Amino acid sequence: SREGRFFSAVMFSSSHRQSLRELQQENADIAAIDCVTYALLQRHQPQALAGLVAIGWSPAAPGLPLITAGATPAATLNSLREALQQLVSDARYRSLCDALLICGYSDMSREAYAPLLAWRDEAAALGVSQL
């Protein structure tokens, strides 16, 4: 990094797909794409990755977080969790889950994501605190 900045400019594309297009059109040098999007594109639309190469991976995390409003009542949270567990356990939805790369569901604590926070702290120690 130089003067606290790692890249000379940052642009926001509004979507992972658009970020990939920007790379293919040589309007960008690097993009962060989540592993689920990347794997789904590899499987279903490999042309969206044509000419691109993954140069690194973030530390593994237990899965992408599922987010709801902070004011969601506990009863609704429990219903959502039960519905998600049923979805991944019910044979009727197996092909859908397989197609979406969903192999299970479990409640996770924030501590499960600690490796990502450690990675962030390591980057900051190396001078990468802002893009």
Image (spheres, rainbow, N blue to C red):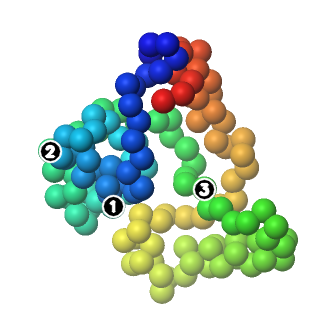
Q: Which mark is residue 88?
A: none
15 to 31, vertically: above or below: below
Pointer 2 or 1: first along the chain: 1
Q: Is residue 103 left or right of residue 30?
A: right
Q: Which mark is residue 65?
A: 3
Q: Is residue 102 visible?
A: yes
Q: Is residue 123 visible?
A: no
Q: Nearer the viewer, residue 72 or 10?
A: 10
Pointer 3 or 1: first along the chain: 1
Q: Are marks 3 and 1 in contact (CB under 8 Å)?
A: no
* Dot 3 alpha-carbon crowd within 10 angstroms: few under 14, some 14 to 19, many 20 or more: few
The residue that label 1 is drawn on is 40
Label 3, label 2: how far apart the Cα atoms are: 30 Å
Label 3, label 1: how far apart the Cα atoms are: 17 Å
Q: Which mark is residue 51?
A: 2
Query: Of the residues shown, which amino acid type is indicated by label 2?
Result: Gly
Residue 81 at x, y percent in the picture? 70, 71
